[in-house]
Image: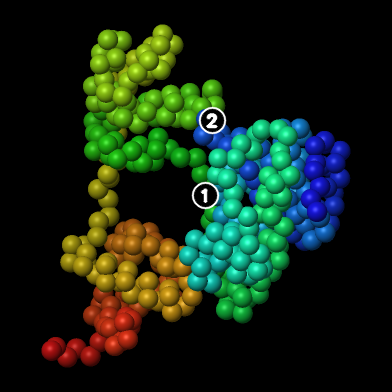
Amino acid sequence: MHEPITDSADLASFIDRALTSDRYAIDTEFHREKTFFPKVALVQMATEDELVLIDPLEVDLMPLAALLDSDRLCVMHAAAQDLEVMMRSCGVLPRRLFDTQIAAGFLGLSSASLATLLSRYEGVQLAKADRLTDWLRRPLTPDQLSYAAADVEHLLSAADKLLSELNERGRLAWVEDECSAMLANALHQRTPAESLRRIKEARALKGRALAIALELVRWRDNRAAEIDVPVRTVVSDIALVGIAQRAPKTMDELKAIRGVDGRHTSAQVGKAILEVVAASRDLPAPEPLKVKGAELDRALRPVVSLVTSWVSQVARDSDLDPAALATRGDVENFLTDGAQSRLDQGWRNEIIGGPIQMLVRGEAAIAFDGAGGLVLERRSGEVL
């Protein structure tokens, strides 16, 4: 059974009870298709003894900060977006997090969905969701409420089984490190340069055009946040790059740029864009987005694909999600002097970092094992 919470007194009472538990599960339903910030529509929470559905359209979620900022363990699945919701709604993140998707990755389940996880560990088949469900519409139907409740109903039990397997394999500390990194990443504010790198057409900008683009991104993000709309609604990516390249001085010049439409040429918005462009013209040329820093030695480039294939084999043999062990980028950075990589230290270094260094030094070789697999062997030095 799930209990609805639609007033502050009931929420306060639930929080008091939850604070007597060692842990709690949480999930959210939200929309952000038409907004800059996620608009939370429902919060599902479970402890060992109860399951509640909190209606954020009726009750302020801020009191949940007391639970999030406690030493109780917060259990979530694929928590990244839910963390953003919690930060926005409560002003804090969970102090301690156990993400069941991350945990499953360290037990061989690659990017496991909640449905996959619950089917494997709880024998529960989740109902298929309508991805177009309007969670902000009231009243929510019994089917909607039951579907939402199922997201946390069995999550603590599944977490128990994951924790048991992780402890048996000595991997719990690995998961704790990854969950801590997720919490740290949730606090990171993306810079204009990071936003521009996500736009393929913007990566080659330089000089004055890049300076304009960076300021336009800064203005676009601030404007989108101010009126709570998606950034593409303020200025599309293609229009932003075009404006940066053409540096218009007049409204007519702005209107002639590809991707620019009536949204961008209204009196208020068009004027603001032209002011950003004008203010950016005399700024010092920024560093290129593709900064030439540490680069992989050309002689080692063929090694990357070979090592990445072997890493995938190690992951399969060890019941690990290959991405949890090392991505291609991790391998490239590890082989690049002056670059930082997840393989530099810790358990990843022990499992694959040391062997990769032996391979590069010519002390080891990767070979087929005769059964379709790859193995790293000590190199004999005998040339065939």
Q: Tell me the residue that label 2 is attached to.
A: 35
Question: Which numbered disc, 2 or 1, marks the residue closer to the eye?
Answer: 2
Kindly tell me whether residue 135 is visible in this rendering.
yes
Q: Tell me the residue that label 1 is attached to.
A: 185
Amino acid beneath label 2: Thr
Q: Quadrant of the N terminus?
A: bottom right
- Left or right of 169: which side holds 317? left
Mark 1 surroundings within 10 Å by alpha-carbon count, few (fewer than 14), some (14 through 19), many (20 or more): few
Amino acid beneath label 1: Asn
Residue 26 spot, x, y in % from top left = 69, 51
Find the residue positioned furthest to the left: 384
Number of dots carrying numbers: 2
Mark 2 surroundings within 10 Å by alpha-carbon count, few (fewer than 14), some (14 through 19), many (20 or more): some
Disc 1 secondary structure class: helix
Kindly tell me whether residue 346 is visible in this rendering.
no
Look at 27% across and 45% down and name the residue there.
Answer: 291
Residue 17 spot, x, y in % from top left = 85, 52
Look at 67% across and 50% down and name the residue there.
Answer: 147
Look at 32% across and 20% down and name the residue there.
Answer: 260
Looking at the image, is mark 2 or mark 1 earlier in the sequence?
2
Q: Nearer the viewer, residue 32 or 254?
A: 32
- Hey, which quadrant is residue 43 in on the image? top right
Above or below 363: residue 200:
above
Residue 176 spot, x, y in % from top left = 59, 64
Residue 155 spot, x, y in % from top left = 68, 60
